[in-house]
Image: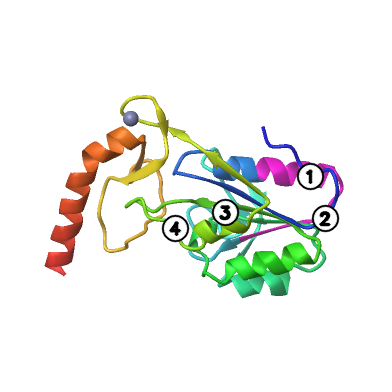
Amino acid sequence: MFLEPKSHTGSIEVVTGSMFSGKTEELIRRLRRARIAGLKVSIFKPMTDTRYSVSDVVSHDKNAISSTAVANSKDILALADDASVLGIDEAQFFDMNLTAVCRTLAARGVRVIIAGLDMDYLGRPFGPMGELMSIADDVLKVHAICTRCGSLAQFSHRLNFGANLVQLGEKDTYEPLCRECYAKVASSVNQLINENCNNN
Ligand code: ZN
């Protein structure tokens, strides 16, 4: 269990994992507790994430918290105002400058809490998440449950292949898998990607 910082100095926390691992729920839990502590909380997410609402960070269990959608990471700096705790959801979709933005905020004394996918559906580091994990004070990797064997899952296996490399997920498009079950489907995934590339 992650314990909140006791003092109000700047810090960077990352909550990461696959689809359906509870990242956003954990982000919301920390932000709610900061609010209860009387701290000013701001929440940002990339404009590309419009699954449920343009103004709320919404997790899969509809546990919503109000947020601001921004076009790029620099907008977060511009709109951070005097927030002492700042949440960023779906951070994998932000530009690589997000690392510098988070460093700047932390240097100002802001507690930055980041949630995002660690890997894309091909198992590659996703956007700025790798860098963010490197510079963070604290990293929590949360896991989903493998839908095929019940083990802990860390891979987001994509069930359908559209035009976009990265789709925003729901249960009909992604399935969380453990390493072993992901390896079993990986060859068919690669085959589909090759077919996709050859057709384009
Ligand atoms: Zn499995």
* Quadrant housing the N terminus: top right
Looking at the image, residue 6 lies above or below residue 54: above
Mark 4 = which residue? 126
In the rendering, which numbered label is found on residue 9? 2
Residue type (three-letter) at the residue carrying disc 1:
Pro
| Residue 53 image point, x, y percent | 55, 55
- Number of other residues with Cα within 10 Å of mark 1, as a class: few under 14, some 14 to 19, many 20 or more: few
Q: Earlier in the sequence, mark 1 or mark 3?
A: 1
Q: Which residue is mark 1?
A: 5
Between 40 and 6, the residue placed more toward the observer is 6
Q: Amino acid at mark 3?
A: Met
Are the residues at dot 4 and dot 1 in contact (C-beta closer than 8 Å)?
Answer: no
Q: Residue at x 68, y 66 (%)?
A: 103
Binning the other alpha carbons within 10 Å of mark 4 as few (below 14), some (14 to 19) or many (20 upward) gives many
Q: Which residue is mark 3?
A: 133
Q: Position of residue 123 (x, y in %)?
A: 35, 50
- Gap in angstroms between the C-alphas marked 4 and 3: 11 Å
Tell whether position 119 is magenta.
no
Ligand 1 near label 3 (Cβ, under 8 Å)? no
Stretch in magenta: 28-44
| Ligand 1 positioned in quadrant | top left
Identify the element where label 2 is drawn. loop
Left or right of 79 in this view: 169: left
